Amino acid sequence: AATTAVGAWRDDDSIEPARPADLAAYQEKGAWAVGDEVHIGDRVVTLPDVVDALRYTSVGVLAWTQHVGADAASARSETRLITPDGEVHPVDLPGLEHYLFAVPATDVTTPYIAYDRPTDDQLQRQLVVADLATGDVSWVGDPRPVENALSLTRLVLSGDDLYYTGSDIRGAIDWRTGERHAWPPGAVTTTGIAGGAYVGTDLATGWTVWSTDGDKLLDVRPYEGGSDSQSPSLSPDGRWFAIPTGDSGIRVYSVATGDSVRLGGDRDVSDYGWTPDGHLLGKQYPHQDSEVELCDPETGSCEGTGVTLAHELTLVRGADGLPVTGGS
């Protein structure tokens, strides 16, 4: 399954590197949206559509919207890259407008986006990786027939590794070389793969953070009153792991050291996302007036952003979820 470079998808110049101040603000404060308004670092951008999902890349945040019409033929999605300086760049990759009900995969440490491109007749699919910084596009593997034009392929991009699963496909591949490799070892269900790490769930004992090479990095047990069925959250760079404490709080672990801090108060993991550098981002009361805040994973301290809202936020919730059941 060779990887074939197919040139660039846009005619304009490559994206300019962000100013240090804009890049630092993006890394620490991340991005979140309410309706059609996207906050990125210290900037605010208004888009023409309500934002359905956000994903981080190294060159900015990917804002994804979907438009579902009266029938499948009229359904489409739109993807835009918002760079740390607040500029909006349409991402008009071939076939991406038909990528519905699943957000294109990204990696917070790279400028790449991965998706599954339908052919013109909708009877085949092609895995695609595009460089948002340069416009270069690579086709991964060969086109394959699909049973249904609307079949869903879920992807996770982690460095050079592309993980994919769907009704007609499952595997893992180095998208640069085309070399196929094993899925993360063991029979697990993951909350996502990021930074070479993923979270395995054992309903009897709790959660374990593993490296994709099969090394155990961190063991975490549920707290009294909590439940291991409550979703934990792995940061997009794989460095931090947040779990519910069972009594309206969040505990955040360093995957590297096992050290942890507790964020008390009326906070729940499901109401918080992440910034690119691993700060937790969210609101204590998602559907009521409350201040958007950033919480430091090392100290446990939280600081308000000065923005108070009564609406739930669209956040980057953590590593993209991908069901994994072992095998290769």
Image (tube, rainbow, N blue to C red):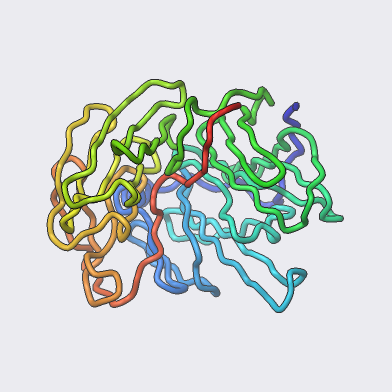
Residue shown at 29% from the left, 77% from the top: 310
79 lies above or below 174: below
Q: Position of residue 209 (x, y in %)?
A: 35, 32
Q: Position of residue 313 (x, y in %)?
A: 36, 67
Which quarter of the figure has residue 99?
A: bottom right
Question: Is 76 placed left or right of 278 in the picture?
Answer: right
Which quarter of the figure has residue 180?
A: top right
282 lies above or below 188: below
Q: Position of residue 24 (x, y in %)?
A: 32, 46
The tally of labels here is 0
Residue shown at 55% from the left, 48% from the top: 15
Q: Work out which quarter of the rendered image holds the C terminus and state it.
A: top right
Taking the view exactly as shown, the residue that stands out farthest to the front is 204
The residue lying toward the viewer, choosing from 111 and 274, is 274
Residue shown at 59% from the left, 47% from the top: 154
Question: Is 134 placed left or right of 119 in the picture?
Answer: left
The residue lying toward the viewer, choosing from 312 and 276, is 312
Q: Position of residue 116 (x, y in %)?
A: 68, 47
The residue lying toward the viewer, choosing from 298 and 255, is 255
Taking the view exactly as shown, the residue that stands out farthest to the right is 121
Q: Work out which quarter of the rendered image holds the N terminus and state it.
A: top right
Residue shown at 28% from the left, 60% from the top: 282
Question: Is 308 placed left or right of 23 in the picture?
Answer: left
Question: Is 141 placed left or right of 46 in the picture?
Answer: right
